[in-house]
Amino acid sequence: MWRHIASNAVTFLILGLFLLGGIILWGRGQYDAPGPLSQAICLQVERGSNMRAVGDDLATQEAVSSAAIFRLGAEYEEKTRDLKAGSFLIQPEASMKEIVDTVTRGGASTCGTEVVYRIGVNRISTQVRELDPATSRFVERAEFTPGEDEVPEVYTQTKAKADTRFRIAMAEGVTSWQVAEALKAIDLLSGAIAAVPAEGSLAPDSYEVSEGDDRAEILTRMAAAQEQRLAEAWEARDPGLPVETPEELLILASIVEKETGVPEEREQVASVFVNRLNQGMRLQTDPTVIYGITNGQGVLGRGLRRSELRKETPFNTYVIDALPPTPIANPGRASLMAAAQPASEDYVFFVADGTGGHAFAETLEEHNANVARWRQIEAERGAEAAGNASTGGN
């Protein structure tokens, strides 16, 4: 009898183990399988939250089939303690495993609301925008100019949220003075700026920042990035360039940056200046003259006068025979590489062509013809503008 009971007990134990193994395999399959989410969502994980609360939230939003399996899977992978606070974009059909990886890997939030402090050539602005999970595109909620416009309430509210992401977006071609002034105007930051960084020494890019970050440390980050980019460009430079130092390459790149807003033209514009330097010709570029007038402190806001084009200054490339003494802006990576590897062209002239780009020429005769076409375009535009003004724009 006891032998029969023992035999049955062993049988039941074996069956139980098989059932348990089957349940585990089933649960693992559920954990790894595509999830039920049909449309992307932005998952908010509050500070101090836990996997149980996150799993319940996901189940409520129909992003996981079982909150319990989600929690047990995270525990099995020993990731429960790695949960990060923030806003996370959960893609359609994301598996529980993928969601756990998303909320535990760290780094910046991947969705939700962000504040972007934009440092542009013509203005600085603060933009509050929110990612629409359905389209993966940001929707603007507010934009204003610090120090000029009234601060909108949505900015104050967004800034106070724990999961808000903050970025500084520095455009190519801004001056170091503009960057320093913009950082001073950002109320999120702290600390003083002892001096304006050397012109050209800051890398245009997007920089993640947090409340209380030191302004001087942010400038140090920007300078380190530019130093690395310049070193890479100098290392990759074509042989025979008419520049002898990385600083001269940086000066050339800054002129290329200010001369064209068309990315595809950078190498051609660089080739014009390289050819001019190789032939002993003056660069004759307006942006250097403008920099000599403004010292990089804002935009000129008007056309150059003939007297300014004739006046001898260290930055007037219509008068001096070579590069100006310093960069005239902070060039981006593309302009650095264009200066290091210009196009193999014989162009020595260029002028606006009416499309936002330039017409290039090898001879003065070709250039004069291009100039004549540009002046005709200007005259036609002037006549059209005058006609619109006289008719009220109708």
Image (cartoon, rainbow, N blue to C red):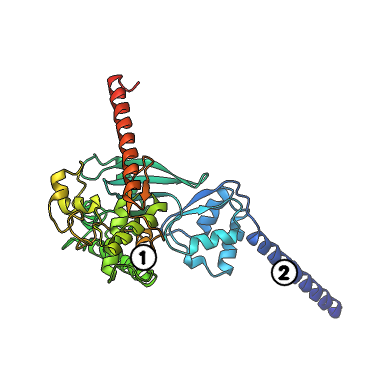
* Res 21 label: 2
384 w.r.t. 228: above or below: above
Q: Quadrant of residue 301?
A: top left
Residue 206 in sight from this viewpoint: no
Horizontal side of 101 relative to 251 (left or right) equals right
Which is nearer the eye, 277 or 264? 277
Q: Residue furthest bottom?
A: 3
364 w.r.t. 24: above or below: above
Q: Quadrant of residue 305?
A: top left
Amino acid residing under circle 1 = Ala
Q: Residue furthest top?
A: 391
Q: What whole-number distance in Å separates the C-alpha atoms at marks 2 and 1?
A: 63 Å
Q: Residues within 10 Å of mark 2 (few under 14, many from 20)?
A: few
Identify the residue at image location x=57%, y=69%: 77
Task: Tell me residue 187's x, y (percent).
Answer: 24, 52
Amino acid residing under circle 2 = Gly
Mark 2: which secondary structure?
A: helix
Image quarter hosting the C terminus: top left
Task: Tell me residue 38's x, y (percent).
Answer: 60, 46
Image quarter hosting the N terminus: bottom right
Which is nearer the eye, 206 or 40? 206
For label 1, the residue is 340
